[in-house]
Image (cartoon, coloured by chain):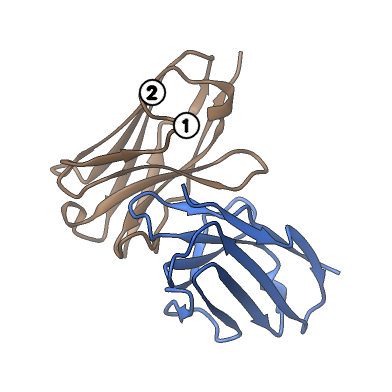
Chain colours: A brown, B blue
């Protein structure tokens, strides 16, 4: 069955960096685009970024553009999110999700918590 | 960017009640709208897509309707497991997605 497992979350100081990973299984990873969506504590969902199935195209929310980089390793069925220049506003649970159907997010990971604090 | 406004932001209801949640968009999106249910500490779960198509495995007491800028999610006969937060999401500007602010359904 489809499974997405995020990792790499933790506590980081403002201005620091963190790299999240999302390990995929149960489907042909290289055939689908992937999203990252985040949720600040007690808040709603915020779309963060998307990568095309072959990694050739990427899109970012304005709130993270220039600081976050999405990438993927199709040989390892793994999605990454490199987060630099982190601020307290980036504190959230980060979910990866499969784009099986052009923006309809059927499968999500369990999420990984990123806490930016001094 | 397309903005989504959900109302109400929270509501109290009893088991068996009929509940309606509204999602309004800042510009017309045809039927490019999905609804998700999220329980505390869990990832969102897709309920409805294309405004009114029920995702496989989702109980038929959930239904969606709407077109353009106004959409509704209806739960007919609220069950104990339905107390959760519900989000609408547009995908007309794919792959840039936006979500509504959420509606928390609580037990009266």
Pinpoint residue B52: horizontal percent, then vertical percent.
Answer: 48, 79
How far apart, in angstroms, are the residues tagged by discs 2 and 1?
Answer: 9 Å
Disc 2 sits on a residue from what chain? A
Q: Secondary structure at mark 2?
A: loop
What mark, if any, has residue A26 been given in the picture?
A: none
Pinpoint residue A27: horizontal percent, then vertical percent.
Answer: 23, 61
* Residue at image mark 1: A63
What mark, if any, has residue A67 been given in the picture?
A: 2
The answer to whether A47 appears left or right of B7 in the picture is left
- Quadrant containing the N terminus of chain A is bottom left
Pinpoint residue A40: horizontal percent, then vertical percent.
Answer: 59, 38
Q: Nearer the viewer, residue A37 or B94?
A: B94
Quarter of the figure with residue B11: bottom right
| Mark whose residue sits in front, 2 or 1 | 1
Q: Nearer the viewer, residue B53 or B68?
A: B68
The residue at 15%/41% (across/down) is A56
Q: How many marks?
A: 2
- Quadrant containing the C terminus of chain A is top right
């Amino acid at each position: 069955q489809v499974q997405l497992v995020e990792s790499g979350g933790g506590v980081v100081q403002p201005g620091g960096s963190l790299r999240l990973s999302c390990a995929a299984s149960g489907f042909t990873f290289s055939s689908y685009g992937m999203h990252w969506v985040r949720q600040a504590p007690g808040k709603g969902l915020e779309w963060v970024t998307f990568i095309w199935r072959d990694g050739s195209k990427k899109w970012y929310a304005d709130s993270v553009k220039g600081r976050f980089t999405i990438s993927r390793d199709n040989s390892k069925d793994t999605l990454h999110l490199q987060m630099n220049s982190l601020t307290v506003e980036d504190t959230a649970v980060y979910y990866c999700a499969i784009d099986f159907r052009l923006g309809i997010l059927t499968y999500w990971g369990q999420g990984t918590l990123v806490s930016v604090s001094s | 960017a397309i903005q989504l406004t959900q109302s109400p932001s929270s509501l109290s209801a009893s088991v068996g009640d009929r509940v309606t949640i509204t999602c309004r968009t800042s510009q017309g999106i045809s039927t490019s709208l999905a609804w998700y249910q999220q329980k505390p500490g869990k990832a969102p779960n897709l309920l409805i897509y294309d405004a009114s198509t029920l995702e496989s495995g989702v109980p038929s007491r959930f239904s969606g309707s709407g077109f353009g800028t106004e959409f509704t999610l209806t739960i007919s006969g609220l069950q104990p497991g339905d107390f959760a937060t519900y989000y609408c999401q547009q995908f007309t500007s794919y792959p840039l997605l936006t979500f509504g602010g959420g509606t928390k359904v609580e037990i009266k």
